[in-house]
Image (cartoon, grey):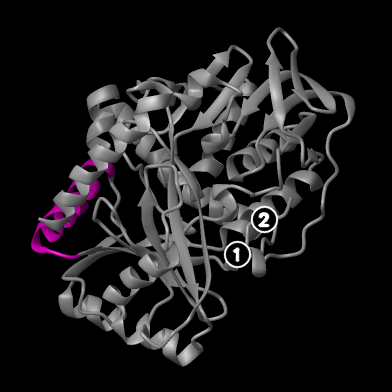
Amino acid sequence: MQHIRSYYAASANPAPLREPLRGDVMADVCVVGGGIAGCSTALHLAERGYKVVLLEGKRIAWGASGRSGGQAIFGFAAGQDKLVAQVGRENARRMFDVSVEALDLLKERVARHAIDCDLHWGQMHVAIKPRHETELKAWREELAADYGYTSLRWLGRDEVRSLLATDRYTGGLHDTRSGHLHPLNYTLGLAAAAEAAGVRIFEGSQVVRLEHGDTVAVRTAEGIVRAKHVALCCNAYMDELSPKLRARIMPVGTYIVATEPLGQARIEALMRENIGVTDVNWVLDYFRRSADHRLLFGGRVSYSGLDPLNTERATRARMLKVFPQLVDVQIEYAWGGYVDITMSRAPDFGRLAPNVYYLQGFSGHGIALTGMAGKLVAESIAGQAERFDLFTKLEHRDFPGGRALRTPALVLAMLWFRLKDLL
């Protein structure tokens, strides 16, 4: 099983093809899922001295961790107001601090393990209309006053225009602490670091069943891992492993295109600084530069679970709304994948049993937060559960309608939000 055809796969660092699990293996912890969350969990546990086995159904970073937009951003997709409503202001502040620590952890991991992943700092949320400006300015004031986050600077239309060669945006909120990277190479680097720390990684090892108990049996088609603890880091690819967890997330398709190489002069004329950019529509666009001077542009979503026809053409059309001067440029790669969203857009961390942990529902904020979530699981298994348990206070509901009707219901809801984007 190879990674899907994408710019990331074409520019991936060398990585070994790991054998599937065969036979009976003992471990202190079995991690299920080889994305950022799983690799981070395994690495943190191995550094604490635990004997760890990681099982990946396909290849390391085969899912969202190897396909996403690659922007590492503070906070949560839910917004702080929803967290405050559920857990109170003090706990919401502690959660926010965890999200900021996630950025510091990413920076530390890349430096310590010399992960070659084209990491750059700087990110900007941009406004398309006056309503967005009002929202972004209020957000900046709230984050500074209530959460002590002061790295955000408001840029007016002319300042944004000096950074981006487009007339589409009326203003922007520039953040020096957030950034962007090559997500596949970052995840491959985490996996290599985990192996160097002693983790045994098996690819092509889809987990088919868990048998709970003081020692959990984690079964694949050809083998079993018997472990004292299990961490499920499957996210949008939970499938039949836990119907209970699967009902609380919705796999959402998102799509990205990569242009042909534009050359350094042309890409720098489009984007003077090497930052990530995201608009604040509900159905948002995001883009950034690549190491070889392409424009990576994405954001069109599908809540139907199907890859829409002509995705490449539609995403290119959205790109040309931002940069019409790229009309002569060819799209060299177009790909998609699933992110897992929750009803509230807040992350869903918890336990299926006292010794079976799960991480899911990152809702598009996974690049930094998944790595931090792995650290929280490792802390909890080691007996320091306070920060992990903070997130278990969040309540999560199943998507309505069951398996047959929940997707059509969500599609109708998303149509309403798309109409709001037009207002």
Residue 287 x/y as whole percent: 39, 67
- Tell me the quarter of the picture where residue 164 sits: bottom left
- In the rendering, at what x and y percent does residue 205 appear? 76, 35
Work out whether residue 268 can be spotted. yes
Could you say which quadrant of the image residue 186 lies in?
bottom right
Quick one: which residue is furthest to the top in this view?
Answer: 213
Residue 229's place in the image compared with 54, above or below, is above
Identify which amino acid the numbered label 1 is placed on. Answer: Tyr
Above or below 227: residue 168: below
> How many numbered callouts?
2
Disc 1 crowd, CA 10 A, few/some/many (<14, 14-19, 20+): many
Would residue 231 be found to the left or right of residue 270 on screen? right
Q: Mark 2, mark 1: which one is toward the viewer?
A: 2
Q: Secondary structure at mark 2?
A: loop
Is residue 141 inside the magenta stretch?
yes
Name the residue furthest bottom: 265
Toward the viewer: 168 or 179? 168
Contact between marks 2 and 1 (CB within 8 A): the answer is: yes
Q: Check if residue 109 falls in the magenta segment.
A: no
Residue depicted at x 80% and y 47%: 196
Relative side of 159 to 74, left or right: left
Q: What is the magenta segment's predominant secondary structure? A: helix
In three-dimensional space, the C-alpha distance between marks 2 and 1, rounded to whole angstroms, equals 9 Å
Q: Which residues are magenta?
A: 128-147
Residue in the image at 62% along x and 30% along y: 378
In the image shown, does 304 or 391 lie closer to the viewer?
304
The residue shown at (75%, 51%) is: 192
List the residue tagged with mark 1. 8
How far across and down, in percent of the image, does residue 15 sit? Answer: 77, 58
Which residue is label 2 attached to?
3
